[in-house]
Image (spheres, grey):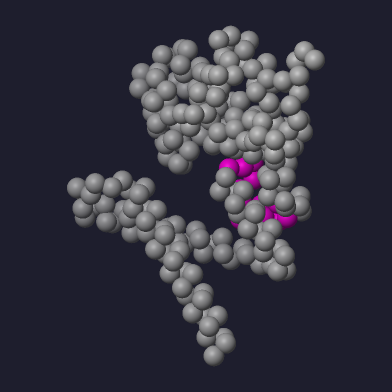
């Protein structure tokens, strides 16, 4: 039947799009866009669509915004994909970046968020209830917004597991505050180290991640030590 490719079923219904539906949305602006071009952009890690159980690619509305942004930069500014990817990678990591030769860039909300999820996608992927997500937002464990990233997805997945033990977001509010203090500690320590050794080859971001891993390991060790103390 004609147009069947645009009706490929997706896990969360109307909110995920097939390749055919993506082409329908973007071809008026980018007539040369084809399924092979979409797969090429995926192979270059510029966009990361999901998959149905049957293996069909699925795209969120955030993915479509990201594709529109990438294709627009290619068409209007003649930027190579390597430069665009470097720019998006920096945004995905939470940093700020500039594009050479581009003085003004209009960025859709989701440009810097690979595999960003809408609210119902977050609930579907994590297995959480709407009430659990609402409480997680209320307790400051995830930030509210129209889109949620992969870090927030992992937080909600962990909250689903904690809920099976009777532990709710309300019980974990103090953990969020402790994390904020740890981030402050990590940032200050790395800033001090960078000032002392300006010749350090590793970036500030790499040092922050390394110290964050050390702090996390220390926290786990302290918790286990305390639990073993209860048993003795």
| Percent x, y of residue 58 | 66, 31
Look at the image and tell me in which quarter the C terminus lies. bottom right
- Along the horizontal axis of the image, is 51 left or right of 37? right
| Percent x, y of residue 17 | 69, 27
Magenta residues?
132-149
Query: Can you see residue 161?
Result: yes
Residue 109, quarter of picture: top right
- Residue beneath the point at 42% across and 60% down: 213
- Residue beneath the point at 35% across and 49% down: 206
Query: Can you see residue 185?
Result: no
Q: Say if 136 sits above or below 164 in the image.
A: above
Q: Nearer the viewer, residue 126 or 170?
A: 126
Q: Say if 69 sits above or below 159 in the image.
A: above
Look at the image and tell me in which quarter the N terminus lies. top right
| Percent x, y of residue 110 | 57, 32
Q: Residue furthest right?
A: 1
| Percent x, y of residue 203 | 31, 46
Q: Nearer the viewer, residue 187 or 211?
A: 211
- State the count of labels: 0
- Residue beneath the point at 59% across and 52% down: 154
Q: Nearer the viewer, residue 154 or 57?
A: 57
- Along the horizontal axis of the image, is 39 left or right of 117? left
- Residue beneath the point at 51% across and 17% down: 72
Residue 38 falls within the magenta-colored stretch = no
Residue 134 falls within the magenta-colored stretch = yes
- Along the horizontal axis of the image, is 114 left or right of 2? left
């Amino acid at each position: 039947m004609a147009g069947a490719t645009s009706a490929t079923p997706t896990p969360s219904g109307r909110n995920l799009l097939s390749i055919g539906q993506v082409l329908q949305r973007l071809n008026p602006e980018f007539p040369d866009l084809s399924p092979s071009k979409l797969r090429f952009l995926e192979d270059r890690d510029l966009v990361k669509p999901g998959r149905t159980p049957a293996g069909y690619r699925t795209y969120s509305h955030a993915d479509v915004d990201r594709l529109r942004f990438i294709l627009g930069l290619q068409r209007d500014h003649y930027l190579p994909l390597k430069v665009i990817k470097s720019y998006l990678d920096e945004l995905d990591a939470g940093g700020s970046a500039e594009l050479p030769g581009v003085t003004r860039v209009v960025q859709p909300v989701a440009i810097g968020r690979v595999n960003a999820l809408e609210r119902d996608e977050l609930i579907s992927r994590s297995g959480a209830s709407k009430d659990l997500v609402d409480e997680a937002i209320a307790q400051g464990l995830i930030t509210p917004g129209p889109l949620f990233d992969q870090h927030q997805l992992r937080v909600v997945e962990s909250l689903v597991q904690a809920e099976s033990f009777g532990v709710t977001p309300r019980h974990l509010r103090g953990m969020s505050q402790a994390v904020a203090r740890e981030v402050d500690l990590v940032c200050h320590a790395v800033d001090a180290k960078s000032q002392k050794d300006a010749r350090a080859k590793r970036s500030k971001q790499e040092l922050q991640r390394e110290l964050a891993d050390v702090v996390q390991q220390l926290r786990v060790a302290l918790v286990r030590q305390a639990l073993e103390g209860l048993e003795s």
